[in-house]
Amino acid sequence: FLENYVPARPMFTIEMNGLQRSDLSMIVQGLDTSQARDVSLNAVYNTSTDGIIPRFSIDMVYDLGESVELIDIKQVSHVEKIRTDIVMFGVPRSAEISSSIGDVLIVDLFVPIEYRLSSNSIDSLFLQQLRYVEDRWWPSTVFMRDLPSEMHLAAEPSTEFNINEITSFQGMFTLDYSSNSDRMDLFLESKGKSQNVQGDNLMIAENLPDRFLLDTTDDWGATISASGKGVERIYIKRTNAPAVPGVNMKSAEMIGENLKGVTIHMPTVLGVPVVILDDITSGRIVATADVDVEFAGVGIEGRGVLMDAQFTGIIPTSSSMGVNGVVTDLSLIGSLTGGTVKTTHIMAGEPVSSAIATLLATVMS
C-alpha cells in the first residue's frame, strides 16, 4: 500500500527472480506523474504441478488511483519449463482478477460499479502459457477484446470417458461463459503438447452473448447454447489429429453465424459416421475437412462428399451436398417463424461418391 504516491516515471516494474527457481515480473505503464494518489495492490500467484500440465494461477486485487495503459505480468518456472504471460490493455482503476492457465483456462473479473465507464472494462486481455517439451515451445493462447466489467469464463476438458461409446467428443474442452455484456470477442488456441494431446485446436468467436455454453451430453455428444440473439460469428478448427488407423485428419473446420443453440450427436450406421444436429432454431454453417488416407502403403488425399438432409419434425424440408464440405442455412423455417419451430439436420459422408472423388483427386494430382 502506498499513500499519496506520486510516480517519478510513467512506468514502474516489480521483479522477483530465483524464488523457488522461478522468475516473476510485473510492469504497470501509463501512470500520471503530476498527481498524488493512494495505491493498493495485493497479488498472490501459484504454480501447481499436481497434474501432467502445470497450472499457473494468480489472484489480484488492486486500486491504482487511475486507469492505466497496460499491466504486463510474466512468470518463468525453470523447474517445470513453462512461461506464462498475462497482458492487459486499457486497464480500469480498480478490479478483482482471478486467473488460471495450464490444463484449464479460468478467468474471473469484477470491476467495482463506481469505476465502470460502460458495460465493458478492459480493452483487451492476452494470456499465454508456453510449455517446453521435446526441444520446442508449445503454446496455449487466449486473447479477449472488449472485456465486460463482470465476467466468468472457464474452459476445461471433459472428464467423462467410456471406450465402448463414441469417442469423438470425449475429453473435449468445454466452455462456460457468463458476463454482463454481449460484445466480447474471444480467441482460443492450443498447440499439441501444450495440452498433452495430439492435434491443434482453434476457436474464434465474435460478439459472444452474455451467456454461452459448450458442453458434452449424456449420450456422448456435444451441445452449444447461447442467450439472446446467439453468437454472431464462430470459427472452430482442429488440425493434425489422427482419426482411426490409416486416416489422419489434416484439418476440419466449421464456421457458424447467429448460432443460438445446437445439440450434436455422432452415431455410426453400418460403420458410416453420421452427424445429427438437433434443436436448431436459427443460424448458418459452413463445414469442411481435409483428410490423408494411407492404403496399401500409398498415401491418398481423401475427398468426402457430404450430404445434408434437414427435417422439421419428421418432414424433410431441404437437402444439400458438397465435396469436402457443405454450406447450409441451419433453420430457414426457424428464422421465418421467429425460432418457434426447431429443425434437425442429418449429415453423412456418402461412401460411393466419396470414393470416386478421392480417385479423381488422386489421378489429377
Image (spheres, rainbow, N blue to C red):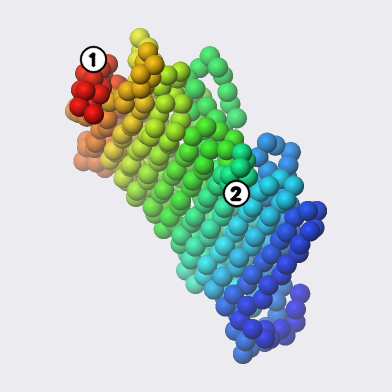
Image disc number at residue 129: none
Q: Which residue is mark 2?
A: 130
Q: In this rendering, does residue 328 appear at all?
A: yes
In this view, 213 is above or below 347? below
> Label 1's element?
helix
In this view, 47 is above or below 317? below
Which amino acid type is shown beneath numbered disc 1? Val
Q: Position of residue 116 (x, y in %)?
A: 53, 70
Q: Residue at x 62, y 72 (%)?
A: 28
Going from N to C along the chain, the mark reached first, 2 or 1, is 2
Q: Quadrant of the C terminus?
A: top left
Q: Position of residue 276 (x, y in %)?
A: 35, 25
Q: Position of residue 134 (x, y in %)?
A: 61, 39
User: How many neighbours does mark 1 have within 10 angstroms: few (below 14), some (14-19), or many (20 or more)?
Assistant: few
> Label 2's element?
strand
Which amino acid type is shown beneath numbered disc 2? Leu
In this view, 150 is above or below 235? below
Q: Nearer the viewer, residue 112 or 236?
A: 236
Q: Residue furthest bottom?
A: 34
Residue 244 position by quadrant: top left
User: How many neighbours does mark 2 have within 10 angstroms: few (below 14), some (14-19), or many (20 or more)?
Assistant: many
Residue 320 position by quadrant: top left
Q: In this rendering, does residue 321 appear at all?
A: no
Image disc number at residue 352: 1
Q: Quadrant of the N terminus?
A: bottom right
Q: Nearer the viewer, residue 299 or 315?
A: 299
